[in-house]
Amino acid sequence: DTGVSQNPRHKITKRGQNVTFRCDPISEHNRLYWYRQTLGQGPEFLTYFQNEAQLEKSRLLSDRFSAERPKGSFSTLEIQRTEQGDSAMYLCASSTTISNQPQHFGDGTRLSIL
Amino acid sequence: SQQGEEDPQALSIQEGENATMNCSYKTSINNLQWYRQNSGRGLVHLILIRSNEREKHSGRLRVTLDTSKKSSSLLITASRAADTASYFCATILMEYGNKLVFGAGTILRVKS
């Protein structure tokens, strides 16, 4: 049983560097979501895709953030010119398009900005 | 912004006791979901309750939903040390598509 896979699990980088995270969803899931979670808080929605189309973006997703899902399978989230405030856990989830079905989460990528 | 609020923020109980966590939300929902998160890990889905349902059970878990009060509760019976985790409620808002809106969570510690 392959769940949602995220790589890398941890990323440490210097302020100003670019980082890219990858998410491989459950294979039959059309929808893919990105969330960000800071310490002591619940996850906050960033963006979601249905197949390769990016259907919604949060205002949290500044122009330094870009997400892609080029073939409707895996997705990447890139952060350019990282800032201290970008330090967080970045979670990916996937789901089917059937209503009232749960989202399944990966174990996240923890980003630390030095 | 966070939609739901969990109560209490933290709960410490002895193994074998029951744990009750509450969640309140602000706007109309399609469904409400409960997730568990162990330290440093992703979220694990526990139960989904639809807006037209009032109660749902899964093993040692019982979830209730009161749409008139915009609140839900999660009961874990006969708790175990392995239940130690953070618990989040999340809602799918009727007017906001498919994104989950989470509360800040309840940290549950079960002492053995």
Image (tube, rainbow, N blue to C red):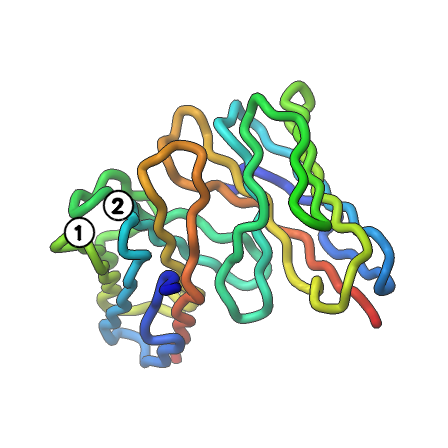
Element at badge 2? loop
Measured from the top left, where is residue B99 in percent x and y?
39, 40
Q: Where A8 sits versus A38, above or below? A: below
Residue under numbered circle 1: A72
Contact, mark 1 vs mark 2 (Cβ under 8 Å): yes
* In the rendered image, the vertical position of residue B54 relative to residue A70, given as above or below: above
The amino acid at mark 2 is Asn
Marker disc for residue B107: none
Residue A66 located left or right of residue A87: left
Instruction: Count the marks.
Output: 2
* Residue ID at (82%, 56%): B78
Report the quarter where the C terminus of chain B lies.
bottom right
Q: Look at 60% across and 49% down and name the residue there.
A: B88
Among all residues in the image, which is located at the extreme top? Answer: B68
Q: Is residue A106 depicted above or below A57 in this figure?
A: below
Point out residue A85 in the picture as x, y percentages from the top left corner.
41, 64
Measuring from the top left, give residue A70's x and y in whole percent. 12, 55
Name which residue type carries label 1: Gly
Res. A48 image quadrant = top left
| Chain letter behind tag 2 | A
Find the distance from the CA under tag 1 to the CA under tag 2.
Answer: 7 Å
Q: Foreground: B21 or A67?
A: B21
The image quarter containing residue B54 is top right
Residue at 65% across, 45% down:
B58
* A10, A41: nearer the viewer: A10
Marked residue nearer the N-terminal end (1 or 2): 2
> Could you say which disc has been placed on residue A30 in the image?
2
